[in-house]
Amino acid sequence: RVLFRSVGTAFADAASMDAACRAAADAGIRVSFSSIRLTRRVLELFREWPEVIDNQTLAVAPEAATGRMRRVLDKDLEARLDQFLDSPLPARTKAVKMYYLIGAPGERDEDVDAIAEQARSAHRRLAARGVSLSLSVNPMVAKAHTPMQWTAMPDRNALRSRLGSLRKRLASKPRIAVQGLGARDAEIQTMLSLGDRRLAPVIAHVSEHDGTRAAWFESLKRHGLSLDFYVRRERGEHEILPWEIISHGVDRAQLYEQYSRIMDLAGI
């Protein structure tokens, strides 16, 4: 088969995608998306080109399952998710993978429980059409140049407890597979995302010692650095951030205003 594969979630929303699918159909080519955003346009593409879109697995990212956490993450997809689960899917789709975050500001046990409930509902609706479901559940990794750059990561044991509780709730039949980053790997990613120049020798040391998880923690200790300083410390409004030497076109005050609004929504 000849396959045109697009990378990135925005391609399916492109104004020309309908014409691209039509051209692909005429040429006997199939179209595949690496992941999709749950928009009205994407659902229309599924209805209009079920034989052209060749995704055996569809990846979607609700990220949260309660209204409060959806507002915190600014990703309210509940209505679109319901439409997706009840709408026609591409003819060759055999599996759906849903992505969620844990550890966002203000998260409570009931927010994690709601992920399990939403997954059970999705499983029932997809199984009726012969489509399987799996989850990818990952601790939130704060990114530079976003409102979350000021936030602190939750305690490691709290993350493990919530992920373990979710896995347990989804282990009973029908079992729903749950994959994702562990707490320690998420800590390393957050450290690299929000780190400063003092991490340079740490990175160099790890690159020379097989890049294992243990090597990261050993190297931090060797260089007198604290993991908690990078990942579990809420940054102050006026703290100078290492990455601010790079201009990305978004005003810092605007980002902090968004961060303050997130904290208010989270009840912090």
Image (spheres, rainbow, N blue to C red):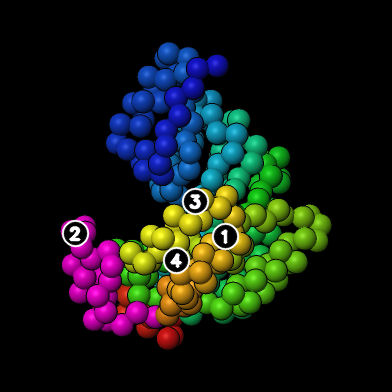
Which region shows up in magenta?
234-256
The quarter of the displayed image where residue 8 is located: top left
Name the residue tied to disc 3.
207
Give the spatial CA distance, label 1 vs label 3: 9 Å
145 or 258, nearer to the observer: 145
Residue that badge 2 annotates: 247
What's the residue type where badge 4 is placed? Met
Q: Secondary structure beneath disc 4?
A: helix
Where is residue 229 drawn, in percent x and y?
A: 43, 77
Q: Give the residue type at disc 2.
A: Ser
Label 2 to label 1: alpha-carbon separation: 33 Å
Is residue 18 placed above or below 231 in the rendered structure?
above
Question: Does label 4 or label 1 sit earlier along the sequence?
Answer: 4
Local packing at callout 3 (Cα closer than 10 Å; few below 14, some 14-19, many 20+) is: few
Which residue is under mark 4?
191
Q: Considering depth in this image, is 87 or 130 the residue closer to the camera? A: 130
Q: Which residue is mark 1?
A: 215
Quick one: SS at disc 3? Answer: helix
Q: Earlier in the sequence, mark 4 or mark 2?
A: 4
How many other residues sit within 10 Å of disc 1, few (<14), some (14-19) or many (≥20)?
Answer: some
Say whether disc 4 or disc 3 marks the residue closer to the N-terminus: 4
| Residue 108 percent coordinates (x, y) | 57, 79
Q: What is the x, y in percent for residue 243?
A: 27, 64
Q: Nearer the viewer, mark 4 or mark 2?
A: 4
Q: Quadrant of the C terminus?
A: bottom left
x 47%, y 18%: residue: 29
Left/right of residue 209 with respect to residue 248 in the rendered view: right
Q: Earlier in the sequence, mark 1 or mark 3?
A: 3
